[in-house]
Image (cartoon, grey):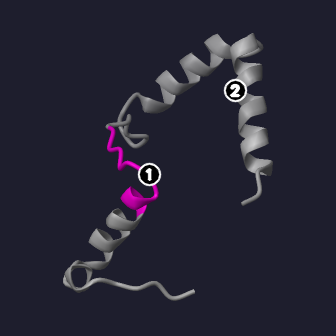
Amino acid sequence: MRQIVSASEKSLSKFQRYRVKKSAQGMKLLRIWVPDPQALGFRKEAQRQAALLRGTPEEIEALAFIEDAADWED
């Protein structure tokens, strides 16, 4: 399906056009800072937090959500 591209959109970069398209679809770009898995201490802290959650209702709920999301078809 071909889309009509306005003259102003022709001068935009590929990424800028992508952002305009997503914005028109009601999407918003979100940038966040997350822990660096390569940082010293990351593995130990992740293991510590995982151990705190192991077997809790929150862990079960999170794993069920991940499984449902993995099965979700477009």
27 or 57: nearer the eye? 27
Residue indicated by mark 1: 26
Instruction: Give the answer, above or below, for where 12 lies relative to 68.
Output: below
Q: Quadrant of residue 20?
A: bottom left
Query: What residue range appears in magenta?
Result: 22-32
Badge 1 marks a residue whose secondary structure is: loop
Percent of width and height locating residue 73: 77, 57
| Most common SS among magenta residues | loop
Of the numbered discs 2 and 1, the one sitting upstream in the chain is 1
Percent of width and height locating residue 45: 48, 22
Indicate whether residue 23 is drawn in magenta.
yes
- Count of marks overlaid on the render: 2
Placement of the N terminus among the 4 image quadrants: bottom right
Q: Which amino acid lies under the numbered mark 1 shown in the image of this protein? A: Gly
Q: Which amino acid lies under the numbered mark 2 shown in the image of this protein? A: Ala
Placement of the C terminus among the 4 image quadrants: bottom right
20 horizontally vs 26: left or right: left
For residue 61, the mark is none
Tell me which residue sits at (77%, 14%) in the image: 55
Which mark is in front, 2 or 1? 1
Indicate whether residue 12 is drawn in magenta.
no
Instruction: Give the answer, above or below, for where 48 lies relative to 62.
Output: above
Q: Quadrant of residue 16?
A: bottom left
8 horizontally vs 69: left or right: left
Instruction: Give the answer, above or below, for where 59 lies relative to 36.
Output: above
Percent of width and height locating residue 56: 74, 11
Tell me which residue sits at (69%, 26%) in the image: 62
Tell me which residue sits at (52%, 26%) in the image: 46
For residue 62, the mark is 2
